[in-house]
């Protein structure tokens, strides 16, 4: 009789922005691995349970396996600490976590820390020991966050709603061509032929990396538990296995100090652009400030000011290129951000009508911030400058750059 166990997966409804409802795989992602087969880039085999310690951290183990596979594909060998992520993501040691929250912890809280810095060592003999130190030390957090200076992580749900198992199979095959993929599974039911299966309506309780679809159309997964014959970490499932949820991962390197010839050209334009801005500021900033007044009273809900993220201008150029903005509109967007916020992700200005403009792109609270709007809160905006630039670039692409006061002043004729 098969033993079905929940290994730490919590499946939440995908209905809000925070749950990723607006981040569903579409047809615009670039194909990087046409075969959809990631088995040529295997990663370290690390069990999430050993020495009698069950960590309930499958969302950390599965997600990091996918990220490590993608890095290896890009020529970078890495092994990250699942324990570090489990602690920083506040995974419940007795119930687990939902994968979206765990992955967002990589992007917004912890980054990635080398396994050697906080391993699942044999001297850990209890769940309580595994989830220490908590809170995480400043030293380890600082090193983990250093990962952000090298890589930008994105992730999307592969589907929403209730597609059929056959439709999910096709969606997953397409997703595997654009990035690495994690799926939820029922752990575990095995047939006499060795394939793992479940009834379509059964709920999943485990999170694993989907490696490929084999020549017979069977999905093969990389597990954080070792059992069975052959490679004990690999399992082959029935062709139409009804995965409940799935995520696809994308990694792009952060622009470094030695750019390519194309990047050098772009940066030269930025330098020239900033030189122009110095002159423009004298003409326009006074007019902009007349329509705003900075906050003068302390607001305990606001985070302390910070320096703009390193290389944020270069990231903005990359985003504009991905969205499909022309060079002219990219330059206009950069000028607009410079004059709106000075590239400060936590800029906040109060308007004379009582509304406020928040973040690096100065989105207005009346139209863009709050329940049911593009951004849930100003704190979310402060923590996600790249997301703000992406949404701004989309609006520029849609012909709505005039939403920004500075843009209208710079380009009154559109």
Image: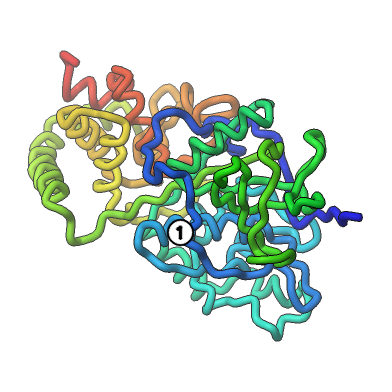
Across and down, in percent, residue 328 comes to 15, 28
Residue sitting at x 49%, y 49%: 180
Q: What element carries label 1?
A: loop
Residue 53, compared with residue 167, is above or below; it is below
Residue 52, compared with residue 268, is above or below; it is below
**Left-right relation of 404 to 376:** left
Residue sitting at x 48%, y 53%: 38
Residue sitting at x 19%, y 22%: 409
189 or 399: nearer the eye?
189
Q: In which quarter of the image is the C terminus?
A: top left
- From where the camera sits, is residue 298 visible? no
Across and down, in percent, residue 22 comes to 53, 30
354 or 270: nearer the eye?
270
Residue found at the far bottom of this picture? 123
Which quadrant of the view contains residue 215?
Answer: top right
- From where the camera sits, is residue 173 visible? yes
Residue linked to disc 1? 40
Count of numbered circles on the image: 1
Which quadrant of the view contains residue 166?
Answer: top right
Which quadrant of the view contains residue 391?
Answer: top left
Q: In which quarter of the image is the N terminus?
A: bottom right
Q: How crowded is mark 1: few (under 14 residues within 10 Å), some or many (20 or more)?
A: few
């Amino acid at each position: 009789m098969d033993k079905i166990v929940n290994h730490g997966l919590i499946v939440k409804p995908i209905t809000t922005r925070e749950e990723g409802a607006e981040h569903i795989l579409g047809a615009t992602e670039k194909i990087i691995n046409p075969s959809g087969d990631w088995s040529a880039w295997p990663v370290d085999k690390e069990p999430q349970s050993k020495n009698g310690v069950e960590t309930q951290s499958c969302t950390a183990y599965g997600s990091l396996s996918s990220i490590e596979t993608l890095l290896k594909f890009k020529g970078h060998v890495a092994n990250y600490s699942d324990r570090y992520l489990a602690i920083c993501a506040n995974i419940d040691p007795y119930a687990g976590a939902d994968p979206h929250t765990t992955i967002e912890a990589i992007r917004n809280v912890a980054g990635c820390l080398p396994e050697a810095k906080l391993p699942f060592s044999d001297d850990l003999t209890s769940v309580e020991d595994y989830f220490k130190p908590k809170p995480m030390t400043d030293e380890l957090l600082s090193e983990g966050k250093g990962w952000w200076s090298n890589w930008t992580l994105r992730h999307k749900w592969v589907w929403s709603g209730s597609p059929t198992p056959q439709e999910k199979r096709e969606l997953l095959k397409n997703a595997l061509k654009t990035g690495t993929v994690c799926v939820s599974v029922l752990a575990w039911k095995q047939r006499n032929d060795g394939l793992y299966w479940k009834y379509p309506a059964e709920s999943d309780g485990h999170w694993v990396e989907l490696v490929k679809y084999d020549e017979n159309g069977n999905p093969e997964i990389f597990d954080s538990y070792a059992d069975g014959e052959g490679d004990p970490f690999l399992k082959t499932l029935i062709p139409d296995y009804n995965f409940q949820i799935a995520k696809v991962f994308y990694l792009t390197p952060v622009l470094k100090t030695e750019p390519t010839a194309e990047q050098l050209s772009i940066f030269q334009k930025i330098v020239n652009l900033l030189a122009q801005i110095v002159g423009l500021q004298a003409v326009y900033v006074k007019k902009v400030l007349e329509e705003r007044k900075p906050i003068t009273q302390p607001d305990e809900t606001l985070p302390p000011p910070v320096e703009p993220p390193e290389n944020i201008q270069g990231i903005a150029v990359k985003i504009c290129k991905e969205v499909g903005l022309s060079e002219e509109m990219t330059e206009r967007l950069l000028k607009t951000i410079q004059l709106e916020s000075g590239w400060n992700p936590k800029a906040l200005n109060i308007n004379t009508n009582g509304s406020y403009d928040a973040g690096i792109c100065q989105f207005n609270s009346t139209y863009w911030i709050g329940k049911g709007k593009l951004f849930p809160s100003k704190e979310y905006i402060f923590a996600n400058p790249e997301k703000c630039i992406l949404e701004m670039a989309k609006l520029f692409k849609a012909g709505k750059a005039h939403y920004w006061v500075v843009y209208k002043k710079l380009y009154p004729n559109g």
